[in-house]
Amino acid sequence: MNRAARALTVAAALALSAAGCAKPVIGNPIAIEAPGQAELTGLAGLWEGTYLCNQGETGLRLAVDPPRAGAVTAVFEFFPLETNPKAARGKFSMIGTVINGRVLLKQHEWIEQPEGYGMVDVDLPGPVPPDAPELTGRVVFEGCTTLKLVRK
């Protein structure tokens, strides 16, 4: 940008400011939390445990990102256990929100899909305290029941 164009740009900015287009903010800004943000904050982190579905008890690793705008993203990773070595391995992403005081993690997209497996949803009691050492909930899918997780 040449010197004349730069001077014109500065002059235009000053004129707009003087005309009232750029008004100062008076007072202190306040932080407004998105709906559901508090209920989701304690869920963030890595959780490990098991869940129960038609294939039997299966290992579960649930990695939950910190909430943004009242929602969380997570990865649901399942794997075989010594007690159930025939269970498959797989993982998919999830999106979580708060509905009627409960945390609902909805299936989103496969990352690694084993043949014959479907994604599930997860229903958790909310809010989840930030210092909660354990988490129990329900796997929402035909033939599935509970999940039990420990914070890692």
Image (cartoon, grey):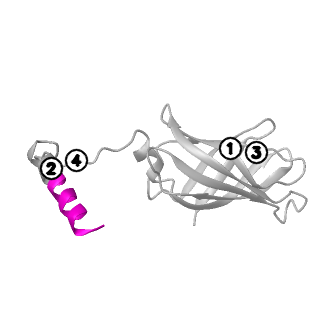
Q: Quadrant of the N terminus?
A: bottom left
Q: CA distance from mark 1 to mark 3?
A: 6 Å
**Mark 4 residue type:** Ile
- Point out the stretch of residues depicted in magenta: 1-13
Horizontal arrangement in the rendering, residue 36 relative to residue 76 (left or right): left
Q: Secondary structure at mark 3?
A: loop
Q: CA distance from mark 4 to mark 2?
A: 6 Å
Contact (Cβ within 8 Å) of mark 4 with mark 1: no
Q: CA distance from mark 1 to mark 2?
A: 40 Å
Q: Write down the residue under mark 1.
A: 107
Q: CA distance from mark 4 to mark 3?
A: 40 Å
Where 43 falls versus 139 (above or below)? below
**Mark 2 residue type:** Asn
Q: Write down the residue under mark 4.
A: 30
Please rate how many residues cluster around mark 2, counting C-alpha atoms within 10 Å: few if below 14, some from 14 to 19, many from 20. few
Determine the residue positioned at 20% across, 49% down.
Answer: 29
Please rate how many residues cluster around mark 1, counting C-alpha atoms within 10 Å: few if below 14, some from 14 to 19, many from 20. some
Which of 125/90 is in front? Answer: 90
Determine the residue positioned at 86% across, 49% down.
Answer: 55
Q: CA distance from mark 4 to mark 1?
A: 34 Å
Residue 79 horizontal/vertical position (percent):
79, 61
Residue 103 horizontal/vertical position (percent):
54, 41
Residue 53 horizontal/vertical position (percent):
80, 45
Please rate how many residues cluster around mark 4, counting C-alpha atoms within 10 Å: few if below 14, some from 14 to 19, many from 20. few
Q: Secondary structure at mark 4?
A: loop
Label 3 vs 2, first from the N-terminus: 2
